Image (spheres, coloured by chain):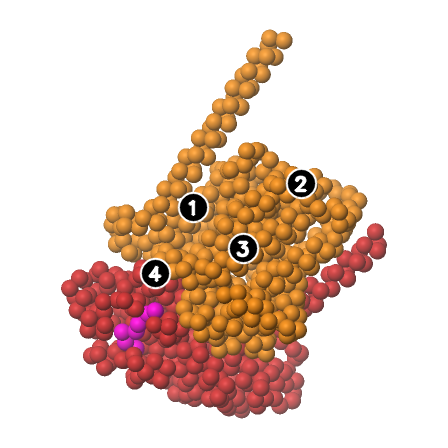
Chain colours: A orange, B red
Amino acid sequence: MLDNLWAGFGAFADPTFLLLAVAGVVLGTLVGVLPGIGPIGAMSVLLGMTTQLGPAGSLILFAGIYFGSTYGGSTTSILLNVPGEASSVVTALDGHAMTKRGRAGPALTIAAVSSFVAGTVAIFGLMMFAPWLSGVAVLLGPPEYAALCVAGLLLLAALSSGSTAKAVVMICAGLAIGTVGIDPAAGDLRFTFGSDALAEGFSFIALVMGVFGVAEALTLAGRRWRPEPVRAPRLRELLPSRQESRDAAPAALRGSTIGFLLGLVPGPAAVLSTFASYVTERKISKRPEKFGAGAVQGVAGPEAANNAAAGAAFIPLLVLGIPFAPTMALVLAALLLNGIVPGPTFVDDQPELFWTVIAAMYIANFMLLVLNLPLVGLFTRLLAIPPQALMPFVIGLCIVGVYAEGNSMFDVVVMLVAGLLGFLLRRSGFSMAPFVLAVVLQPTLEVSLRQTMAYSAGDPGYLLGRPVAMAILALVVVAIVLSTRRALGSRRRARLAARREARDESRS
Amino acid sequence: MSIRQVRMRRRAAMPAILAAGVLAAAACGGPPGQAAYPARDVQIVVPYPAGSSIDTTTRALAEVINDQGKLGKRVQVVNREGGAGSVGTTATLNAKPDGYTVGILPDGPLTLVPHTEEVSYDPRNVSVLSEVTISPVLFVVPADSPYRDLRDLIDAAKARPGSITLGEGPLNYAVPAEKFEQLTNTRFRHVSFDGDQATTTALLGENLDVGVMQLAGAFAQLESGKVRALGIASAERIDLAPDVPTFAEQGVDLEWEAYNVVVAPPGLPDAISTKLSEVFASAVTSAPFRQAAKKLGLVVSGADGAAAAKRLTDKSAAAADLLAPSR
């Protein structure tokens, strides 16, 4: 295996490959940082070039874009509270809180190092366990997918910092919005009112850009803001304190594991893994109240998770030839255009290509670390610009990005309306993350639920024959019971404390 | 302060260039001139997203066309996805018939969807230029399935009606599945899957007994031996999968194929129609495209506009019988 890996690195003696790795990583970071344009957009534009690049070249470029974008999305999350990608929504919770506390430099470093650690873990896992893990992941059927979706949504409702009831309202809104358009199972049109534009359903990218990009820009622009004197953190200031490093390291490792495992499962693994990691960190923390106020673990865990998920997503693609995410569908297209059909025999038939890709991923990850820590200073300078000047630029970029993605003015209107509604809802204390996750999960949840019902033919006993689905649902129930008990417990403690305080006061 | 703003603008240049590139790739050029056709680049609309099978096919074809240079201008692929292909189909058929907008469409929106949905285009009023590829439907089972051929499957379905799970999906899968039940007087437990990839996953995970698939979607897994095909619904055995017997060979009179066709809005001037037909026919039958299609598991057609139009009409008629009473 080491010989193979060495041979894979040998391919990088060719400067073209090295150049492609740099280009991919820089481009990926750029589209990750910028709201509006994502890795899917960048990859589809470059797809036409892939036959010139050859299979190895295009895989190197695409892997760089993918890893770069999952990392790059965190930068604006931390600095501006504007997630560049859906997978860095969670990072904004504590990352931006750290920025407010003046710890932007360490937050960025922790995000970069955690991503690097997770990327390395994921690539190592891809190398070691690829065939075996895919065999397990593929056994999951519709009941398990449905259970996973339910788990994802309920975990999120438990996670939301605000009111759980409001989170559930947003989840329901997301599920409802998701049903507009083509029925994923039967192909009928629903809730379109005869409109062609709605036949497409609402564009996910338009919705996300609206409720995150535009709404955030409006929120910031509405604030009376005097630009704070922000200086780029010097190299020394990028270093986290000893305590911060000690907190971040185990969180990054746990995040890597969670991300890797979820990355093997079909669905929006990169997004889901960040939520799962965040909940885990908060659950096991001795001081959960610090989460949302700049907990280091809340940055390290999710950032590790999304990168590990990105690496793990290559496993089902390469070993089964099945992409589980739209980005992976584009990687598959690049391979097919070059005459490579990934599948169970891929590693045996194309050992050089497989090992070059593994080596490319190691190199891309290393470059992210090397390139981005110095670049952090550049991004920090963006903070010197008053938001009133930056936000029109963000909105402009969102409009261009949304239009470019679907060539549709309707999407632009959807984004602006979603932005306005998101702005108003946020002011009333509704959080947008549950809404977005519900929209993402809706098709999977609906299709797998309907398939489950078709399989069972109306017999609920069918579910008893699906131990994995039952186990997932049981875990969700246990998690909810525990978190309710904990919430009730802390409320009782708060009441007791208040009573004691009142007693103390009356005594004195 | 002002220095910082200038800096920002410089940094903004990269995304702006990127965005401009994205737009340039999607937009079309200047006004149509008086000069001979084509005066500018031709858009090929694909009604599915980048990375989908038909998109990959179209991009391979577009590259051949641009390499051959017979058009005189370049062709550009534009993805107008959504609505199970209806959005891109509408965009193509309702465009100006000036030869600058053509579409590479799967046949479904022209032959099947109009039977079940109200569509905002006229599926009979189309300029069909050429047939690009054919993808026959197969019945696929996991490698260790107890069913060796269609006979086994029919016998098992008769012994346990309604209990063998049959994975179908959009109309191009659902219609042949129902047709098979009619022809063999059997009943299966239907489960809808969202295309070939979902069906493959279910078959590999042993969550499904039989999957209705298209050759292009099943090709990689058939090659690897993880799944087996019980039968192929083409008129004759095909070169890409010579070991798979046809349905007719096994006594079931079912033929069902999906087509990708080049179409233009109705009322295309004859000169332009001829020119485009020649350009596409020459690219479709070229060696590089055959090579690309073979790797994707697609049968190259190359049938001319008239033949392709007839096939579409026939298929639409065949589906009408089945879709009308059941819906």
Residue B242 in the image, given as x and y percentages of width and height: 32, 83
Q: In screen coordinates, is A245 left or right of B181?
A: right
- Which residue is under mark 2? A242
From what the image shows, is residue A403 above or below residue B57?
A: above
User: Which secondary structure, mark 1?
Assistant: helix
What is the three-letter code of the residue carrying label 4? Gly
B228 part of magenta stretch = yes
> Residue beneath label 3, please?
A121
| Above or below, B319 relative to B11 | below
Q: Observer-nearest residue: B108 or B227?
A: B227
Instruction: Give the image quarter of residue A393.
Output: bottom right
Q: Are marks 1 and 3 on the same chain?
A: yes
Alpha carbon distance from label 2 to label 4 = 47 Å
Q: Quadrant of residue A348?
A: bottom left
- Alpha carbon separation for disc pair 4 and 1: 21 Å
> Which residue is at a point 16% across and 66% down the rendered structure image?
B158
Observer-side mark, 2 or 4, equals 2
Residue depicted at x 27% and y 53%: A456
Residue at which label 4 appears: B205
Q: Amino acid at mark 3?
A: Val
Label whose residue precedes the other's in the sequence (1 or 3):
3
Q: Chain of mark 3?
A: A
Residue sitting at the far left: B159
Q: Which residue is mark 1?
A: A151
- Residue type at the position of mark 1: Ala
Q: Would residue B269 be visible to someone looking at this image?
A: no
Q: Which residues are magenta?
A: B226-233
Instruction: Give the secondary structure at mark 4.
Output: loop
Identify which residue is drawn at 65% across, 85% down.
Answer: B33
> Label 4 is found on which chain of the structure?
B
Q: Are marks 4 and 1 on the same chain?
A: no
- How packed mark 2 is, by other alpha carbons closer than 10 Å (few <14, some 14-19, many 20 or more), is few
